[in-house]
Image (cartoon, rainbow, N blue to C red):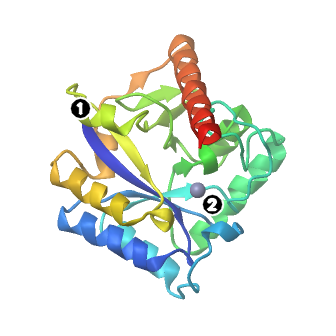
Amino acid sequence: MKIAIRMDDITPDMDWAKFDRFKALLDKYDVKPLIGVVPDNKDEKLSIDPKREDFWQYVKELQEKGWIVAMHGLNHLYTTKKAGLFPIGGKSEFAGLPLMKQDEMIRQGKGILEENGIFTDIFMAPSHSFDKHTLTALKNNGFCVITDGFGITPFKCHGMTFYPIAVKRSDSISDTRDGLVTFVYHANTMDDKDFQKLGELLDMGIVVSYSEFSKGYVEERGFVGEARQYILAKAKYTAMQVRKLRG
Ligand SMILES: [Zn+2]
């Protein structure tokens, strides 16, 4: 199994020391990730450093170097407790809202990115949460790829292409099948041990650039495959909640 890297919560005021530390590791192995940029962040938890003034210019430079950019929500605020179609989180910025509202939010986010010279057709839902209306709104606004779902190869569902994320990292690392999955990272909250683990992963030689997803085979996924994924996602969420309760 090959591994691609996705970095969530990219904002002008993120923890830049951690971002730079992450980037230095990726650069060492010439790996280019997917970065989820929040168009207009209002989530205080993601605000750590003073805003970097040349943020958009910098994102553009990264994109020119082969980093892939996704739109990560609009404000990164959780307005509903709906888990949506891929229920590994219990909250959402989008799921549960009327189509008109979601369409407006997605159009607004895309507009902000484009005003700043960033063009993308990839969407990264905060807390992995989206519903059927989100998918319609995304399609209306020219998005065709979502970084979410379980699988070992890109798949098509509801008229969108999904680039899957790993269910369990250790299982993906030891999986000998031919495939590609995403490991999700939030550099803002990483500690020394997390960085060490990332270094070890990169050292294994199984990490590839995110752009590899666009080269592979795309599976058509029907109702059964989707139902299986829903059950797996729900189980993963339940297992996480149980772990939290046990401390
Ligand atoms: Zn996020």
SS label for mark 1: helix
Asked if the beta carbon under badge 1 is closer than 8 A to the nearest atom of ligand 1, the reply is no
Does residue 102 appear left or right of residue 247 in this picture? right
For the N terminus, the quadrant is top left
Please tell me in which quadrant of the rendered image residue 29 appears.
bottom left
Does residue 71 appear left or right of residue 6 in this picture? right
How crowded pointer 1 is (Cα within 10 Å; few <14, some 14-19, many 20+) is rated as few
Foreground of the two, 170 or 220: 170
Foreground of the two, 135 or 20: 20
* Residue pointed to by mark 1: 174
Q: Is residue 8 above or below residue 43?
A: above
Q: How far apart are marks 1 and 2 (CA)?
A: 38 Å
Residue situated furthest front in the rendering: 246
What amino acid does circle 2 point to? Lys
* Residue pointed to by mark 2: 110
Q: In this view, does 230 lie above or below 147?
A: above
Q: Which residue is drawn at 51% across and 51% down?
A: 121
Q: Does residue 40 appear in the picture of this structure?
A: no
Q: Is residue 92 above or below residue 193?
A: above
Q: Residue at x 53, y 42 (%)?
A: 144
Please tell me in which quadrant of the rendered image residue 151 appears.
top left
Foreground of the two, 189 or 29: 189
Residue situated furthest top in the rendering: 224
Q: How many labels does the image show?
A: 2
What amino acid does circle 1 point to? Ser
Q: Give whichever of discs 1 and 2 has the lower sequence position.
A: 2
